[in-house]
Amino acid sequence: MTLTKKDFMSDQMVRWCPGCGDYSILSQVQTVFANLGLPKEQIAVIAGIGCSSRFPYYVDTYGFHTIHGRAPAIATGLKTTRPELSVWVVSGDGDALSIGGNHLIHLFRRNVDLNLMLFNNRIYGLTKGQYSPTSETGKRTKSSPMGSLEAPFNPIALALGAGAAWVARSVDVFTNHLRETLEAAHAHRGTSFVEIYQNCNIFNDGAFREFTERDVRDERVLYLTPGQPLVWGTAVRRGLVLDGLALKVVELGDGLTEADCLVHDPTNLALARLLATMAPEEGFPVPVGVFYDNPRPTYDEAFRAQVEQARARLGEGDLAKLLNSGDTWTVRA
């Protein structure tokens, strides 16, 4: 049976604010799920707490709305015991990087075979507009009326530093790019991390307008394509070159061509880190696409292999015997 996007639309009323970027992401995810060719019962969506974490209600698959920040831990348990499932974790910048930060970095370290989408709107939307771990320094919000004093997390740099094997970024309104990125995430074996810039039109409207609007997009966005030069722009063509150990923006022309620019190699961790830490306010573009792709063994495969080794050496075991094997106590009310 061939499934369509409509098959993955649930019967639940979508309760996001009108105009929220989550609608675009939901639409692309439903399309991607239809394109996977998997029956619905082989897809599981696990979410934490936040606006983004309503996601399991809005896709007609199995899913679990878990507790704040703990979606990676619960998804890890699911994938290790049900390896045939395609497991997707949905989280926000607050859910994943604040209370869930420790679970997130250990997911990257372990490299569990699942896909994690981090909706980054640089604000706490569900709880009405406090600054989040990705809000810019000086951000005035209900919880920082004089401006946030904190430096924001860079989710891509954090993932790379924690040992993630596949790291990418897309944008809610870059619909074709987002869909292609999510399909590539599914194809990767291991933890796939996709940061998705997402607009909160109620509490942080226009957070990414400086590079997402159609009239500026071509001049501000660098699309990362493996094997292709790191160049961008139409009115003015620019590219990236190495200046010592740092990246430098050059304007093409007067003898400088695309051949003089760096070529994107997603297996190069040093390059991925340089791309992740480019500062748009210093004239650098905003990169989207796959920063890093370097497969390595997955935790869940190693876990299942270890269990099989134990069974081969010790037998199936007896749970009742184990529970009664040492000192026991009877507790009476």
Image: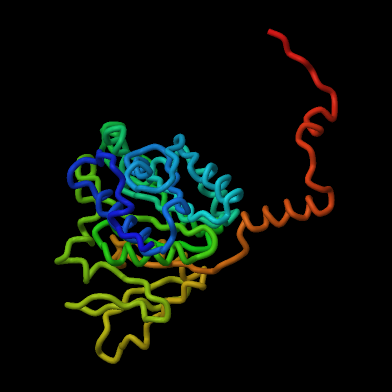
Would residue 96 be visible to someone looking at this image? no
Q: Is residue 239 above or below residue 193?
A: below
Query: Residue 195, image x and y in percent?
Result: 38, 56
Query: Residue 64, image x and y in percent?
Result: 45, 40
Residue lying at 33% horizontally and 85% vertically, measured from the top left: 258
Q: Answer with left or right where residue 28 lies relative to residue 88.
A: left
Q: Residue at the left extreme?
A: 215
**For this rendering, which residue is in front, 246 or 154?**
154
Residue lying at 44% horizontally and 63% vertically, measured from the top left: 185
**For this rendering, which residue is in front, 138 or 141?**
141
**For this rendering, which residue is in front, 319 or 121?**
319
Query: Residue 133, image x and y in percent?
Result: 39, 43
Residue lying at 62% horizontally and 63% vertically, measured from the top left: 297
Q: Answer with left or right where residue 100 lies relative to residue 19.
A: right
The image quarter containing residue 139 is: top left
Q: Quadrant of the N terminus?
A: bottom left
Q: Answer with left or right where residue 325 lies relative to residue 246.
A: right
The image quarter containing residue 83 is: bottom right
Q: Is residue 166 above or below residue 263?
A: above
Query: Residue 269, image x and y in percent?
Result: 52, 68
**For this rendering, which residue is in front, 247 or 40?**
40
Residue lying at 38% horizontally and 81% vertically, measured from the top left: 228
Q: Quadrant of the C terminus?
A: top right
